[in-house]
Amino acid sequence: MLLRALLVPLSELIVAAPEDTLEDALDKINSENFLSIPVVDDKRFVGVISKERIFSTYFELGGDREEFLKNNRVADLVRTDIPILSVYDDIEKAAHTLETYGIPFVAVMDENGEFAGIITHHAIFKTFVEIFGMNKGHKISVIAYDIPGQIEKLTDIITKMGGNIISFVVLDPKVKTDVKEIVIRIDTDRFVETVDAIRDAGFRVQ
């Protein structure tokens, strides 16, 4: 799935400009109970300004709080090391980037190199929930040896039993034996019979 289908577009974002005062930025952050917001100069993504960075700098420098917020600009504290992805990158790359860098969001650029929007943790989680088909059909968790033909064998059994596969995910259970956990969601009126058929074929169903 491409990021262009998942991003929160620039038109829907609350953003700060580099020349904004920290007071202005903090007001914007607090207006929606955010922890941080993107910093944008026209349609160019600059970075992110966070409540934590504002206050940690204030406590480090000391002095009058109101004066600090009024006399310093977003450009002074903006974090600029936020990774930038393309609208044509996929969700896996965005998820890996968010996890690796420990950041609140990933910036996304369009084909013209302009800031298109952001991908958040929430968007990633929501998409993976949809991929797993949560609350749809019946869930079957199968333990299978990691050898060729196992997936084909499973899908063939489900098809012959008249089931429709909603989602199919292969997981690594992190055990010493060479097995995989296959989580399947199916739409079927013969769930018990399907599970029995899978077991009869030599699979372990949890």
Image (tube, rainbow, N blue to C red):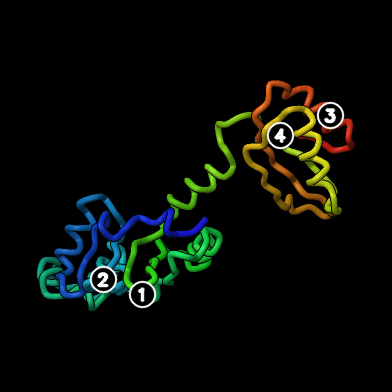
Report the disc number at residue 113.
1
Mark nearest the camera among 1 and 4 is 1
Q: Which residue is drawn at 82% across and 50% down?
A: 179
Give left or right: position of 30 versus 185: left
Report the disc number at residue 43.
2
Residue at the bottom extreme, as displayed: 76
Q: Which amino acid does label 3 sit on?
A: Ala
Helix, strand, or loop for circle 2?
A: loop
Q: What residue type is labelled 4?
A: Ile
Q: What residue type is labelled 2?
A: Lys
**Dot 2 crowding, Cα within 10 Å, few <14, some 14–19, many 20+:** few
**Mark 2 vs 3, N-terminal side:** 2
Res. 180 visible in picture: yes
- x, y percent for residue 160: 79, 31
Q: Are marks 1 and 3 in contact (CB under 8 Å)?
A: no
Q: Distance between the residues labelled 1 and 3?
A: 53 Å
Report the disc number at residue 197.
3
Q: Do the residues labelled 4 and 2 touch (CB within 8 Å)?
A: no
Report the disc number at residue 140.
4
Q: How far apart are marks 1 and 2 (CA)?
A: 9 Å
**Mark 1 vs 2, N-terminal side:** 2
Q: Distance between the residues labelled 2 and 3?
A: 57 Å
Q: How far apart are marks 4 and 2 (CA)?
A: 47 Å
Helix, strand, or loop for circle 4?
A: strand
Q: Are marks 1 and 2 in contact (CB under 8 Å)?
A: no
Occupied quadrant, residue 178: bottom right
Mark nearest the camera among 4 and 3 is 3
